[in-house]
Image (tube, helix red, strand yellow):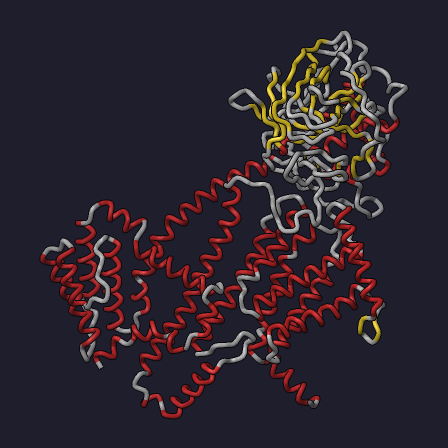
Amino acid sequence: VSAADVAQRVLVGLRSDRARWPQAGLAALTTAVASWPVTLLLSDASWLLPALTGLGVIAVTGALARGADRSGPAVVALQAAVAALVLSWILVPGYHWLGLPRLAAVSEAARLVGEGIATIRDETVPVTARPGMVLVVVVAIALVGLAVDALAVTRRSPALAGLPLLAVLTVSASGTGVALHPKFFLAPAAAWLLLVGRQGVGEIRAWRRGETRSENGSRSEGATQSEGRARGEAARGEHEDPFSHDRAEAERGVRQGAQGYARWGRVVGAVAVVLALLVPAALPHLPPTVLAQGLVRAAGQAQDGPVTFTDTLDLAADLASRSTRPVLRYRTDDPMGTPLRVAVSTTYDGRRWVPGPEEPPVQQGYPLPPGGIDVEQHSLTVFHNELRAPQVAVPATLTNADFGSIRWGMRPATGAVVVAERPESYGASYWRLLGALPEGMGQGGPPPDADPATLAVDPASAPVATALAQKLTGGATSQEQAGMAIQSYLRGSAFRYSLTLADPVPGPDGQPLDPISNFLETKVGYCVQFATAMVMIARAADIPARLAVGFLPGEKGEDGARTVVAADAHAWPELYITGLGWTRFEPTPGARSGTAPVYRTPGAPIQPAPAPAPTAAAERPSMGTGLGDTPVLDEPAWWDGARRFVAGAGVGVALVLLGALVPLAGRWRRRGARRRAGDDAAAVEGEWEALTATLTDLGVTAPRAATPRQLRAHYARAAPLDADGARALARAAGRVEAARYAPGGAAVGTMVDDVREVTRQVRAAAPWRARVRAALWPRSGTTQLREATGRLGQVLGVGAAARATESPRRRAAPQARRAGRSLTRR
């Protein structure tokens, strides 16, 4: 084969319809848009350019191979080979000879894949975009793009291409651990619908051209025969074809069919996308079960089975859990309820809270509260517990506990209670502070035996924390006054509660600020940010502080029992007050967290914390399923309120749309023949079809295959018409007969008025139920929707194969039958 032959074939392939360049470009674009959420999984976008390059190579290679009339498997194999070669140049450079990869390139790629898998296994999102991770992501997106192109373009089944696209979305959603923004769904949905619509409308236009195509896009024999007939008819001259008028009518019907497909496809596609966004907000949510769940692990992500907190809190991760899965059920004599503590951490490594040295628990009760303070005693009984051992939820001011035969104890360094196995039920006693603190409490510095970790300030945020500590606690005369000042500052109106953290702010050196400084600068965050900031500011003020993790008291049911769900998880700071011990503070503004604690000594000014803003949300931390990730996340009230509003409004709008859809479809069907009328005869037919459809809606059905004269007799018997109505019906039927069979056709004349008169009389005499049904749920509307969904199913590929192999003459048969009525009078 000469070079000229090869060049000629390439040029022919470039221009050939078999290449399907528009569909190939749409398939690549749809895959790229569906990969948008992957930006949330990696720390930077170094994977983006290689991924787009791979998708572009797949699209171009596939189009060229199809243009060269290659078979489907050959097209896919060629796409995979060329994409692998090009991506090896980008991802594994330096391992090629004359552009071809050496064996060492395979070894290096395998090493990078192992590195990427280790990153997926060991890190939480957003993971570091190391070369191995980039390779895994780019190859995965290229494989999805290859599958989409093979299904949507080569196999011409774009509806099936939604499955690999769905895999990308589900893996991204499960990896981030949060609900994706609607834009991540709307964009790929719109691109996919465009891909489906392009293919469906193209098929219908091919019917009009009389073309059928084989699987790889080559023209079938039917198309060649159609072209031969068209050339022969043109040679004979149009005047020699007695059926030219009917053929034109059939072709016009096919064109209108293509327009109808596109119109209904747009309507149904838009309704489907809107309902997909609105309906889930109104439905109860089940535990997530997705493809490749855990492939990239979100910190704090929950799974089925017993619940546990993990040992670290990742301050930079944006975690969310809206799970209403019950974790605890208990009864208590405390009308206010109290937070239930599970774990305590004293060490912060610059990004997350980490556990301290492991110490064997000591089995003993908490000491009684210090003397001289006014307290009240309370107890609780847990009768349903899903928290996995060794963790257990108990009040921080525990005085005693009863776990039956299960061994339990406290961590000496933190006082956190642990159990040897998960108790189904247990009891606990605790105390609550009342009134003011005694004189002298909270005076002096930290105790001599204080753990140095409880006074360590994060070096990166130390300048900001120290400056705030001096500003807020400069006038405080005791530790509790200093704690109250910090708490009031963080609960002030300058700070805003939100699950979505603000974008990183560059520091003086141009680099992004550390998480704590970034929060104090942007003043946007959730419970982990608020609690961590207070811990560091208190430590900067020389007050020992640590972070506690547990649950809010939960909701009280009608039976008096409280239910704690996974979404009730919460984090708060504990400050060491001399004479009082470790004391809870509440810097996070939240409705469900309740009023913040207030501590004061006699004669000291009362510093009540600002009341929670009505738009603030309850803390809704998420629960981890293993060690090494963070368990806590909060959910803002704006999302709660917005979700309830959208759910209610969405359901209402959907009901209104559904209620209006059937009447509008009926109106469209009844007036369809009128819109298509091109002459008086067709206008008469359109009015007659509108009459029969309206009477059917009102309960006066017509026998099938009846002539106009037979229908006139039927309506005269079945419909309560007076003399004027009967004459109007007779005139209308006569005009239809003349339009169909008379040599000169028939003028419209009084046809419109006659149809209106018959319709008015039948509607006036119909029972009220029939009139309501005709107005709200007409049979013409349901018939139109049923036919439209059938046509849409063909557009989506359900009947595409059968329609593609039908002969052009058979496809045009319905239009030919309608046009053939005029043959009788010829």
**Residue visible at 24% across and 56% down in the picture:** 696
Answer above or below: position of 667 versus 251.
above
Q: Residue furthest right?
A: 448
Q: Residue furthest front?
A: 405
**Residue visible at 69% across and 17% down in the picture:** 402
Q: Position of residue 683 (x, y in %)?
A: 26, 69
Q: Position of residue 505 (x, y in %)?
A: 76, 44
- Residue 122 visible somewhere in the drawing: yes
Q: Is residue 522 left or right of residue 635?
A: right
> How many numbered marks are there?
0
Q: Is residue 352 left or right of residue 621?
A: right
On-image quarter of the N terminus: bottom right
Answer above or below: position of 788 versus 621.
below
Q: Nearer the viewer, residue 153 or 240?
A: 153
On-image quarter of the C terminus: bottom left
Q: Position of residue 458 (x, y in %)?
A: 84, 35
Q: Residue furthest left?
A: 723
- Residue 476 visible somewhere in the drawing: no
**Residue visible at 47% across and 63% down in the picture:** 798
Q: Is residue 414 left or right of residue 620?
A: right
Q: Quadrant of residue 488?
A: top right
